[in-house]
């Protein structure tokens, strides 16, 4: 076991002395477990780019819609607010529109309609996050599996050779270290991106909830004025 540890330290020391890491060769040295890890990396990158663009577009649409509807509702221009919601593709449009359509059925029905529409739109905002969470968990586990396979190869080499030498176990140790490093390298940025998207979605949901509450207050105020008259 001490021989295995010394060989690993020697490899790290060699890199520290100026040897460059050849990514193509490193991929080959990592063994067959590098192929699923490469797939995870590509899939994660594609999902991150897609989700970033998707949320930015929806955030921009929400900001424009909420700004217009808040002003219209403050002026009690309900029909115009409904028209703006119907013409918009923003997630908030479906929520506000659901509430406005039931404005004559009472506050409870309005709130229930907003809640139901909100759950549907939230599912749309969170679409793709489950895949990022899965990749963030599976990538390091796959790397650790590669580590186990590499150590098995190292001990098999020792068994066949009958003695412990650095050259005997170097291949297995290399597989173990490369797959572990690759799995963590893939999982860390995916996890960061996942948390960033969750925070962004929470922000958008909070903005929609605030706008929905303003709508309910505006409708309640209109009902009071109608009752008084």
Image: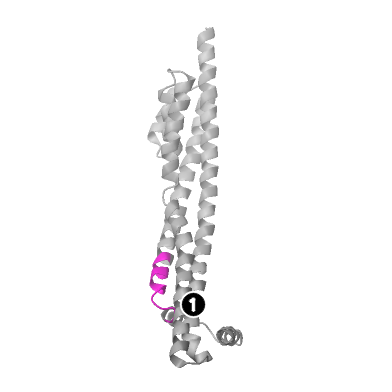
Q: Along the horizontal axis of the image, is 3 left or right of 25?
A: right
Residue 49 forms part of the magenta stretch: no
The residue sitting at 39% across, 67% down in the picture is 39
Within 10 Å of disc 1 (Cα), the crowding (few <14, some 14-19, many 20+) is: many
Q: Which residues are magenta?
A: 29-40
Is 31 colored magenta in this rendering?
yes
Q: Principal SS element in the magenta part? A: helix
Q: Nearer the viewer, residue 26 or 84?
A: 26
Relative vertical location of residue 229 with respect to residue 2 in this rendering, above or below: above
How far across and down, in percent of the image, does residue 221 sit?
Answer: 54, 18
Give the residue at x 43% y 61%: 44
Q: Quadrant of residue 30?
A: bottom left
Look at the image and tell me in which quarter the N terminus lies. bottom right
Q: Secondary structure at mark 1?
A: helix
Can residue 92 be seen here? The reply is: yes
Q: Residue at x 43, y 25 (%)?
A: 100
Q: Give the residue pinned by disc 1.
A: 176
Depth check: 73 or 20 in front?
20
Among all residues in the image, which is located at the extreme top?
229
Identify the residue at horizontal 54%, vertical 13% (top origin): 224
Percent x, y of residue 80: 43, 26
Locate residue 85: give its quadrant: top left
How far across and down, in percent of the image, does residue 10 sit?
A: 58, 87
Q: Position of residue 222 (x, y in %)?
A: 51, 17
């Amino acid at each position: 076991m001490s021989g295995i540890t010394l060989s690993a330290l020697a490899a790290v020391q060699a890199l520290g002395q100026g040897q460059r890491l050849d990514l193509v060769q490193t991929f080959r040295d990592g063994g067959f477990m590098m192929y699923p890890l490469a797939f995870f990396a590509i899939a994660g990158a594609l999902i991150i780019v897609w989700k970033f663009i998707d949320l930015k577009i929806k955030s921009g649409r929400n900001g424009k819609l909420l700004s217009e509807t808040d002003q219209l509702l403050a002026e009690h221009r309900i029909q115009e607010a409904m028209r703006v919601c119907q013409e918009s593709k923003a997630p908030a449009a479906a929520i506000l529109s659901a509430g406005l359509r039931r404005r004559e059925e009472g506050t409870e029905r309005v709130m229930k309609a907003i809640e139901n529409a909100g759950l549907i739109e939230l599912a749309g905002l969170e679409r793709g996050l489950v895949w990022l969470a899965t990749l963030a968990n599976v990538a390091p586990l796959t790397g650790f599996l590669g580590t186990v396979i590499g150590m098995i190869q190292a001990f098999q080499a020792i068994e066949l050779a009958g003695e412990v030498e650095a050259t005997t176990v170097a291949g297995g140790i290399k597989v173990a270290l490369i797959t572990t490093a690759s799995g963590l390298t893939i999982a860390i940025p995916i996890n960061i991106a996942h948390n960033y998207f969750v925070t962004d979605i929470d922000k958008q949901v909070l903005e929609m909830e605030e706008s929905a509450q303003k709508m309910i207050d505006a409708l309640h105020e209109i009902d009071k004025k109608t009752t008084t008259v």
